[in-house]
Image (cartoon, coloured by chain):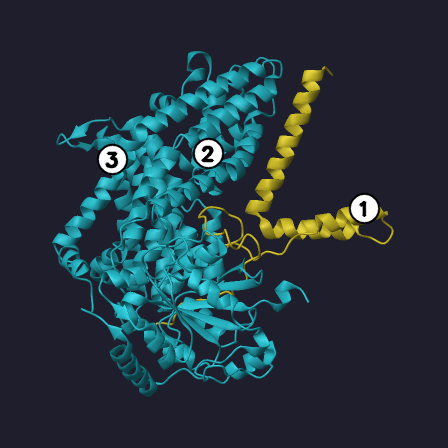
Amino acid sequence: MNATATSLRIALVGNPNCGKTALFNRLTGAHQKVANYAGVTVERKEGRFVAPSGRVLQLLDLPGAYSLDAASPDEAITRDICEGRHAEEPAPDLIVCVADATNLRLHLRFVLELKRLGRPMVLALNMIDAAHKRGIRIDVGALERALGMPVVETVAVKQGGAEALVMRLDAMPQLSVLPPVGAPEGAMLPAVDDNSIAASAAPTKSPSAESSQDLHAQVRALLADTVTMPRATSAIDDAIDSVVLHPVAGLAILAIVMFLIFQAVFSWATPLQDAVSAAVAASGEQVGAWLASMPLLQSLVTDGLFAGLGTVLEFLPQILVLFLFILILEESGYLPRAAFLLDKLMFKAGLTGRSFIPLLSSFACAIPGIMATRSIADPRDRLTTILVAPLMTCSARLPVYTLLIAAFIPRHDVLGVFNLQGIVLFALYFAGIASALAVAWVIKRLRTDKSEHALMMELPAYRMPNPRDVAWGLWERTKIFLRRVGGILLALTVLLWFLSSFPAPPDGATQPPIDYSFAGHIGKWMAVVFAPIGFNWQICVALIPGLAAREVAVSSLATVYALSATGDGADAALGTAIASQWSLATALSLLAWYVFAPQCMSTLAVIRRETNSWRNVWISAGYLFGLAYLASFITYQVARTFA
Amino acid sequence: MSTPMLVQTLALLLLLGWSAVFAARRLLPVTTRRAQARLVAWFDRPSSPAWLHAFAQRLQPTATTGASCGDGCSSCGGCAAADAKPATVESLPLTFRPRA
């Protein structure tokens, strides 16, 4: 019998934002996303670790749930697995119920509900350090006796903070002799197999309202017997919240925070961006010189890879500055407060405060944002959020925005403090948010069925962001970006170079070779459709590979312009080339296009998967293309009139 | 053909081939897997030599779940754990509710 066969399958279960994923990462060495708000984990994650005795323990990290009465799709996954009803996942041998030690009043209720399942359980009192700081004293021995299950203290975010839990798990007997919860000390289960464990859990029913009251009474009694708490909430958090959650001051603070982030994206990233740009240009020249005897390969490397991919690479510093702020906000606990502040506005627009976190996740990428809608219980709200999520400005759009802004918007100071380029970037992000609210409002008007609205959201304790976690988050973003550059962007750039270089121009040709290529012909056909919105054939060529990933549009433009350049303009950077060849109206039109255009096939595929409907995909793609064309048309025509 | 030209042709063919396969697998995963499976079936015929059977085994498409965490789109970084094992989250269908 091997180690895996005899290992325990352990599920980490608990209320949202109690530190399950942090504990999962601590135990398995994984780097799953953690943040200081509820609803980060929406699907199960699996890992394993080797205990000091050499025993292999399999760990399952489940989405947070407040109750086994699942209110949302992510909670349903947790319920089904805990109750042994999941089609693909056997019931766990052991449940490690993670509870926030600073908020036992809320978390113990779910512990008691899980206990009713009758499965072997261990309670992990996480964030015990924060509890001690607040003067909360927990009599672990008394709690253990009262609950009839082992209770251990953990600090998942600290090195060695889960050692007590590991020792406890390592000392657990084999699956066949695990004691059920509530059993007298030393009592053992009779020998059972997986099926019998699952069968024993299957008939368990969710507690009724009556039994729910009973659970609350039990929690109160438990707290009275085992916990000493100076006050229910943190005094510092209450003081901060009195300002941050103020209906006027709170919204003003939120606007200032967002505004400053976009200012910093332009101001802080410039030196690094210049350094990357210089390094790429120098390397391109060097490699180009080495390949002088192979003209086609030289063209691919210099015009395709260095001009195309190098241009995209220059935007990495700006993306990292943006994510530095997002990670700090995520860790601090401010984001759920922002959701609370915006709930009223979002409800008027047909959304809910619960949509805030998925929409915010969409600023990184619409895919995790759409996945995060699983935490929205109401199907109508969920679908609306899914449909508007692509309007949030994902990080892939940042290279396009910053390229055009740097080329066409002067670097003027406004009011002596603000940077005009930063203000335009803020306006573009704001346009995405405003469009999402407008589209949600239209969906609300089209759908007359009403759903109950009540935002029940846990506001986590404020936390000082951990520099190590923030640094790790930035490293992860860098890896993701570089993987994209070295993967799909590289592949599409090579293919675009081929389409832009072949067939060779006929004898006596007077135009640049790209005019006679496949890409040149395709671009010129498309230009007929896009002429009313000011797009030339080069932009049209870039739109096609941009369907795979938005930032490919930048590398494609760089490749197309590098291949189109003749004489003195041949060495010009993309920004300089477009600034000299495009009108301001065209640039603004392209910016407007990118606020709306659904140029990401992965996003459409995830909409199909999450809604199980092609209809929603067509609705989404159709309205986004329609809006993109309309917005670009209006922008172009108005800008041309006033220019 | 001179040596530099031969090197250039080979390098271009390799790069273009890799790019086409990579882009197809990423952008048309289901179609690519179907084509791969058909190719495997053709290589794996009883009359095929042993080395072709072995090659067919290596070419066997791996299971995947389509676009979701773990499909390798690598756009969000949420795939780390799922990389080891295909994600198997059941789909959660949504439909428009009829007008009241």
- Label 1 marks a residue whose chain is B
Question: Where, quadrant-wise, is the C terminus of chain A in this rendering?
Answer: top left
| Number of the label disc, if any, that sits on residue A248 | none
Packing grade of label 2 (10 A; few <14, some 14-19, many >=20) is many
Q: Earlier in the sequence, mark 3 or mark 2?
A: 3
In the rendered image, residue A45, in percent from the top left (x then y), is placed at: 49, 60
Give the CA distance from mark 2 to mark 1.
41 Å
- Closer to the camera in the image, A576 or A17: A17
Q: Does A185 appear above or below A344? A: below
In the rendered image, residue A240, in percent from the top left (x then y), is placed at: 16, 56
Residue at the spot 22% in from the left edge and 42% down from the top edge:
A259
Same subunit, tags 1 and 3: no
Q: Are dots 2 and 1 in contact, CB under 8 Å?
A: no
Name the secondary structure under disc 3. helix
Give the residue type that dot 3 points to.
Gly
Colour of chain B as rendered = yellow
Residue at the spot 30% in from the left edge and 69% down from the top edge:
A448
Q: Are dots 1 and 3 in contact, CB under 8 Å?
A: no
Numbered disc in front, either 3 or 2 = 3
Provide the residue designation for mark 3. Answer: A422
Q: Does A444 appear above or below A601? A: below
Residue at the spot 58% in from the left edge and 29% down from the top edge:
A498
Give the residue type that dot 2 points to.
Ala
Provide the residue designation for mark 1. Answer: B52
Give the CA distance from mark 3 to mark 2.
25 Å
- Label 3 marks a residue whose chain is A
- Label 2 marks a residue whose chain is A
Same subunit, tags 2 and 1: no
Provide the residue designation for mark 2. Answer: A542
